[in-house]
Image (cartoon, grey):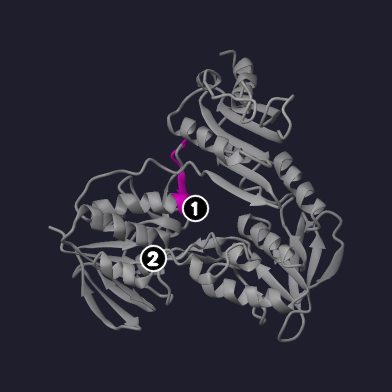
């Protein structure tokens, strides 16, 4: 019998777990703890408050505190869980409220924090991460007065932040350590398309470049960088700096109580999102589960993954029994009007995980060639060389990339092969799309190589 569920963290994962638990069990007591003073808000929307596409910070609040009261969830905001005794099933908390709570089921939704690289000068004022609502508020204020910004890191967060500041009229430089931006998401040739597009819009991108030091006194003057190929050292002027070089799962509290931490540094979970301790679950950015195709350990790091894991944990904590299938890793962003979408394995991850693949790559169009308004779409799909099973896909284009990516993700989840994807009957009208969708064309190219 479950009488009390405690959830540590009130981001997308924690909030979803609470709502799903409440839907299943109307009687169980549910208590949420959040170190931040805010209720659930959209972290993915933060760059768009800086650019002004989202008008106010309040617009990002998805679950106002009074809504928790409506569904009888006790949300303790500005309150940190400081100690957990799982043998007694009690936890202590302090902050806006202090006390002790006895629980029957516990869900960790503690998220992740910025993983700062070994660069000198990151302790200066006006050096920021972009992870919290307060970070975004501070950066929006910087955009009002600053002229030059340096973004260290060319991943999703770094590029979305760079676009936001550029749209505010700032001179923005992205410093990326790897040979291309977004390499955790797309292959180098796809990344090159994105880079060319961003540069055409005035964004400066320095690839294969190591940020070594943030210069200045108490505040930044610039960033010293070193070209990793030529070894040339230079300084980029900066009024402020954003560090977006990745995150690490928050697992300290869980580890202290004996929860197992996996090789990805996340809290290790099974298909029910349960840890090695009975009645203890973990979800979202703090949790490690498995990559869908190879079943290797993986921390998801995506909002879509977080809420799906949270649904499973919330239901199970409340007395249900459902499972999580694993992480496909469907991602999308939009930079200066260009959609970039990726799912499953990239060429690099396939090699790292020792999955031999065959590629289907095409440059198609969103509409028939005779119809005005069609947009070019670069698409590639990856298939297991032995079975022909779809294992990955990437798209770059001005329109409809995300829509097609969702089809590919569904195909991965249902383990379809190149021949089956080639048989996909897409809809058709000249004003909307062509008779042979680019997805089908890509599958055909791979199917021929696979002799299917």
Image-based side of 440 in relation to 151, left or right: left
Q: Residues within 10 Å of mark 2 (few under 14, many from 20)?
A: some
- Binning the other alpha carbons within 10 Å of mark 1 as few (below 14), some (14 to 19) or many (20 upward) gives some
Which residue is pictured at 75% across the width and 43% down the height?
A: 193
Where residue 247 sits: x, y (%)? Answer: 55, 62
Residue 314, image x, y percentages: 29, 55
| Most foreground residue, 305 or 177 | 305
Secondary structure under tag 1 reads: loop
Q: Residue furthest left?
A: 1
Residue ranking furthest to the top: 451
Gap in Å between the C-alphas at discs 2 and 1? 19 Å
> From what the image shows, is residue 176 above or below residue 33?
above
Q: How many marks?
A: 2
Instruction: From the image, tell me which residue sits under label 1.
Output: 302
Comparing labels 2 and 1, the label whose residue is closer to the camera: 2
Picture residue at 72% right of the left edge, 75% below the top? 240
Q: Quadrant of residue 53?
A: bottom right
Q: Give the mark nearest the N terminus, 2 or 1.
A: 2
Q: Which residue is mark 2?
A: 63
Q: Are marks 2 and 1 in contact (CB under 8 Å)?
A: no
Q: Please identify the quadrant where the N terminus is shown.
A: bottom left
* In this view, 105 is above or below 290: below
Region of the chain picked out in magenta, as a range: 293-304
- Relative to 420, residue 62 above or below: below
The C terminus - image quarter: top right
Residue that lies at the very extreme toward the bottom in this rendered image: 218
* Residue 114 in magenta stretch: no
Q: Position of residue 246 (x, y in %)?
A: 59, 60
Specify whether residue 294 is painted magenta. Answer: yes
Which residue is found at the position 76% from the left and 67% from the top? 169
């Amino acid at each position: 019998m479950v009488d009390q569920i405690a959830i540590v963290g009130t981001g997308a994962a924690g909030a979803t777990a609470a709502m799903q638990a409440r839907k299943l069990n109307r009687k169980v007591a549910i208590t949420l703890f959040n170190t931040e003073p805010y209720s659930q808000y959209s972290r993915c929307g933060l760059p768009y408050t800086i650019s002004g596409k989202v008008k106010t910070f309040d617009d990002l609040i998805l679950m106002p505190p009074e809504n928790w009261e409506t569904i009888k969830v006790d949300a303790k905001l500005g309150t940190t869980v400081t100690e957990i005794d799982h043998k007694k099933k009690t936890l202590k908390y302090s902050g806006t409220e202090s006390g002790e709570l006895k629980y029957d089921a516990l869900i960790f939704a503690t998220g992740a924090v910025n993983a700062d690289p070994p660069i000198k000068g990151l302790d200066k004022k006006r050096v920021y991460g972009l992870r919290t609502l307060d970070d975004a508020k501070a950066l929006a204020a910087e955009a009002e007065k600053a002229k030059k910004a340096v973004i260290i890191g060319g991943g999703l967060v770094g590029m979305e932040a760079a676009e936001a500041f550029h749209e505010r009229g700032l001179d923005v430089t992205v410093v990326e350590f790897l040979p291309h931006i977004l390499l955790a998401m797309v292959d180098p040739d796809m990344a090159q398309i994105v880079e060319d597009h961003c540069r055409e819009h005035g964004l400066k991108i320095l690839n294969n470049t190591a940020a070594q030091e943030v210069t200045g006194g108490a505040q930044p003057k610039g960033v010293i960088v070193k070209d990793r190929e030529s070894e040339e050292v230079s300084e980029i002027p900066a009024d402020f700096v954003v560090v977006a070089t990745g995150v690490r799962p928050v697992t300290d509290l869980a580890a202290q109580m004996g929860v197992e931490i996996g090789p990805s540094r996340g809290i290790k979970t099974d298909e029910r999102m349960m840890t090695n301790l009975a009645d203890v679950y973990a979800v979202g950015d703090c949790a490690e589960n498995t990559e869908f195709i190879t079943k290797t350990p993986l921390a998801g790091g995506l909002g879509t993954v977080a809420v799906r894991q949270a649904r499973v944990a919330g239901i199970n904590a409340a007395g249900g029994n459902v499972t999580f299938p694993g992480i496909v890793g469907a991602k999308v962003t939009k930079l200066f009007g260009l959609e970039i979408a990726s799912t499953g394995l990239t060429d690099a991850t396939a090699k790292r995980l020792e999955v031999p693949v065959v590629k289907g790559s095409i440059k198609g169009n969103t509409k028939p060639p005779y119809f005005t308004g069609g947009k070019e779409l670069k698409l590639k799909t990856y298939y297991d060389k032995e079975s022909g099973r779809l294992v990955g896909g990437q798209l770059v284009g001005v329109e409809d990339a995300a829509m097609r990516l969702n089809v590919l993700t569904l195909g991965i989840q249902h383990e379809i092969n190149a021949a089956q994807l080639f048989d996909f009957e897409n809809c058709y009208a000249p004003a909307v799309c062509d008779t042979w969708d680019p997805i089908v064309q890509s599958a055909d190219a791979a199917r021929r190589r696979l002799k299917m």
